[in-house]
């Protein structure tokens, strides 16, 4: 049997020494590269002495090497086409970054040991899915080198590699790495002191109104976050306070976060404030409307304060918050008495 130099791999031969699949593919690719056949109208036939290119009804001989002197062998063009399709559909490999360095011990000698590297699943900056995994790197005479996928532009954000180093003198330590693109890098350029925090972004369009009105922001009312106004308490502008007059039952109604001047019912010399109609989360400051009339803020079921407080001076103030509907709680008081 004559050994054909075109088919060097024994796997290329089929039963009985006949050309196998790999042999047919190799022969077809060789002839295609030499420009001796075309696709798809041409097929090749072996006549026992030569390859023949069969194009339509005309057999045109092609000088080729002998494969087998006994049987006419035809090359099925499906095999090389499938091979070419496979070659061109293989995904591109991950773009790895080299980290190399020399590791020393504290006494200046070169270290021998290992490093165990672990990471979580992520998507690279090139859009490739990187499975979670781990690897071990052994280093001798201080020579350390490994390759990892860059994770600075990966998603989700805040990714890092965890490394556990151990040297033969039984010293061990843990490091966190954030690997940028490019390289090669040294250990000091990828090592981070603290673990990165994931970045969370919430679009304004994703926040529901939840009953908020124009100008309001999220405010914590002591139990939950709810729509409110910044500037409550001491930050409230009291340059132009509105006047509230007690009703016959000794109650007033407040709106928003603001300062209010309290006056007695029907301009009486004195009156008691016994109830405040308010909405949870509101903050307000009460002042005396008239130094000649006294309003006493009473400690009642709806007004939680240290004790009764008299507003009988233009400098007397009491700051309160509406802890629950129609339940006002004292925050602070200031007496400027005469």
Image (cartoon, rainbow, N blue to C red):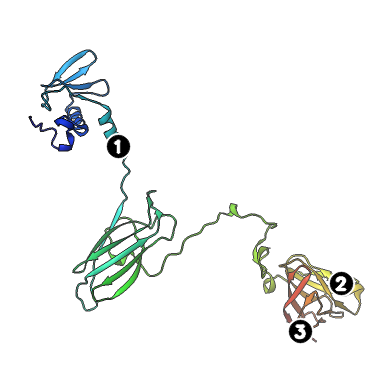
Specify the label residue 238 is tagged with: none
Question: At 10% from the left edge and 24% from the top edge, which residue is drawn?
Answer: 69
> Secondary structure beneath disc 1?
helix
Alpha-carbon span between mark 3 and mark 2: 22 Å
What is the crowding at mark 3: few (fewer than 14 residues within 10 Å), some, or many (at least 20)?
Answer: few
> Which of the two residues, 44 or 231, is positioned nearer the viewer here?
44
Image quarter where the N terminus lies is top left
> Which of the two residues, 156 or 10, is positioned nearer the viewer here?
10
What is the crowding at mark 1: few (fewer than 14 residues within 10 Å), some, or many (at least 20)?
Answer: few
In this image, 250 relative to 320: left or right?
right
- Mark 2 or mark 1: which comes first in sequence? 1
> Secondary structure beneath disc 2?
loop
Q: Where does the image place residue 167, in percent across and percent down from the top left?
A: 25, 72
Q: Where does the image place residue 79, in percent across and percent down from the top left?
A: 26, 30
Alpha-carbon span between mark 3 and mark 1: 90 Å
Question: At 28% from the left edge and 71% from the top edge, which residue is drawn?
Answer: 166
Q: Do the residues under discs 2 and 1 have CB atoms within 8 angstroms?
A: no
Specify the label residue 86 is tagged with: 1
The residue that mark 2 highlights is 246
In this image, 119 relative to 242: left or right?
left
> Secondary structure beneath disc 3?
loop
What is the crowding at mark 2: few (fewer than 14 residues within 10 Å), some, or many (at least 20)?
Answer: many
Whether residue 239 is visible, yes or no, is no
Query: Dividing the picture into quarters, in which one does residue 215 lie?
Result: bottom right
Residue that protrudes farthest toward the left in the picture:
2
The residue that mark 3 highlights is 336
């Amino acid at each position: 049997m004559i050994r054909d130099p075109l088919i060097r791999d024994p796997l290329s031969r089929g039963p009985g020494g006949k050309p196998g699949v790999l042999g047919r593919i190799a022969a077809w690719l060789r002839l295609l590269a030499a420009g001796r056949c075309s696709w798809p109208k041409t097929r090749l036939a072996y006549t026992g002495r030569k390859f023949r290119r069969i194009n339509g009804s005309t057999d045109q001989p092609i000088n080729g090497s002998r494969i087998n002197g006994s049987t006419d062998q035809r090359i099925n063009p499906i095999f090389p086409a499938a091979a070419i399709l496979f070659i061109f559909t293989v995904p591109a490999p991950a773009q790895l970054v080299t980290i190399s360095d020399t590791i020393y011990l504290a006494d200046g000698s070169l270290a021998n040991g290992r490093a165990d590297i672990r990471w979580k699943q992520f998507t690279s900056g090139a859009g490739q899915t990187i499975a979670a995994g781990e690897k071990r790197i052994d280093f001798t005479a201080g020579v350390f080198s490994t390759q990892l996928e860059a994770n600075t532009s990966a998603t989700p954000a805040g990714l890092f590699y965890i490394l556990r180093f151990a040297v033969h003198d039984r010293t061990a330590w843990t490091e966190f790495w954030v690997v940028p693109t490019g390289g090669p890098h040294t250990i000091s350029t990828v090592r981070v002191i603290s673990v990165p925090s994931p970045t969370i972004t919430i679009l304004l369009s994703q926040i529901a109104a939840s009953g908020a009105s124009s100008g309001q922001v999220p405010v914590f009312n002591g139990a939950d976050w709810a729509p409110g106004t910044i500037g409550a308490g001491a930050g409230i502008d009291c340059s132009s306070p509105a006047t509230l007059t007690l009703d016959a039952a000794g109650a007033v109604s407040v709106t928003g976060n603001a300062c209010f001047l309290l006056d007695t019912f029907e301009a009486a010399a004195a009156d008691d404030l016994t109830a405040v109609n308010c909405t949870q989360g509101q903050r307000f400051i009460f002042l005396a409307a008239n130094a000649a009339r006294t309003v006493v803020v009473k400690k009642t079921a709806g007004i939680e304060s240290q004790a009764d407080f008299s507003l009988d001076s233009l400098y007397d103030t009491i700051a309160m918050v509406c802890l629950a509907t129609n339940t006002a709680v004292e925050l602070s008081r200031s007496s400027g008495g005469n």
